[in-house]
Amino acid sequence: MPAIQNIHKRVAALAATLFLFMPFCAPAQISTLNYKGNVLEVKNAADTIEILDPVTTEVMTVIENPNPIPLKLNNMNIYTVNEVEQRPSVSGDKIRRYIIQQLSEHFKRDGEYRLMLDNIIISDKGKVVYHNFNGVEKKIAIQTGHSDNGSNSGPSANGIKTARWKETDKNFSTALSTQIEKVLDKAPVYKPATVYNQPVPCLLDTRELQRPFLVKGGVIQY
């Protein structure tokens, strides 16, 4: 009988653990957003997921899709770059380089950075009409673990070094947000994407927008 009770306890513990790390998905809601003379239909679909950090063994809460996902621009469907027949003349990487170049004076300290940009839309007229910016992240080195040899000195005493992305100063991110908006407002007019030979709004690739860049000796390396 005690053995059966132990099995029940283990099953209950396992079930509780699985529940803890299952994603919690809020029901998607469609809403309308007026932004700089344009009307966007967006889907609010942020997913909250709790994951176990394999290095620190801490439980972290990760929010996926923190920003509303644009679905329509002025009642026109918004396509991804993989859905259109002809892509716009500007890519996510090109926009990323353009923004970094315009903001180069703000990055003086050496390090590896990335701009948390997403949802950049090129309209059917070829203009950047919408974007989200969630701050600047910098790659930092952290130490975890301890020496197992009983010694308090030597390389092993420092533990294991690993790299992490961490948001820089909040004030810096806020100031940069204003600058990025101005930069994108002044961006050139590009050739829009097309579907059935008709110009359509297009969402640029977020992975390209968030590629890291390096600052070394005051010089930016893409």
Image (spheres, rainbow, N blue to C red):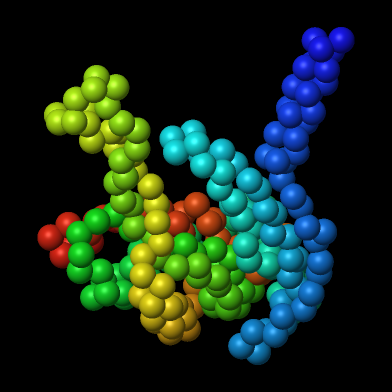
Q: Using the rendered image of the protein, determine whether residue 88 is visible from the camera's viewpoint.
A: no
Q: Residue at x 71, y 45 (%)?
A: 23
Judge whether 71 appears above or below 164 on screen: below
Question: How far from the left and from the top, in percent, is residue 50?
Answer: 63, 46
**Left or right of 190 in this view: 71:** right
Judge whether 22 appears above or below 121 on screen: above
Judge whether 216 appears above or below 2 on screen: below
Question: How far from the left and from the top, in percent, is residue 200?
Answer: 67, 68
Of the pair 8 and 215, the residue shown nearer to us: 8
**Left or right of 188 in this view: 35:** right
Q: Residue at x 19, y 25 (%)?
A: 151
The image quadrant that residue 73 belongs to is bottom right
Quarter of the picture holding the N terminus: top right
**Left or right of 45 in this view: 185:** left
Of the pair 80 and 207, the residue shown nearer to us: 207
In the orientation shown, which residue stands out farthest toward the bottom? 37
In the orientation shown, which residue stands out farthest toward the front? 2
Q: Residue at x 47, y 62 (%)?
A: 116
Q: Using the rendered image of the protein, determine whether residue 133 is visible from the camera's viewpoint.
A: yes
Quarter of the picture holding the C terminus: bottom left
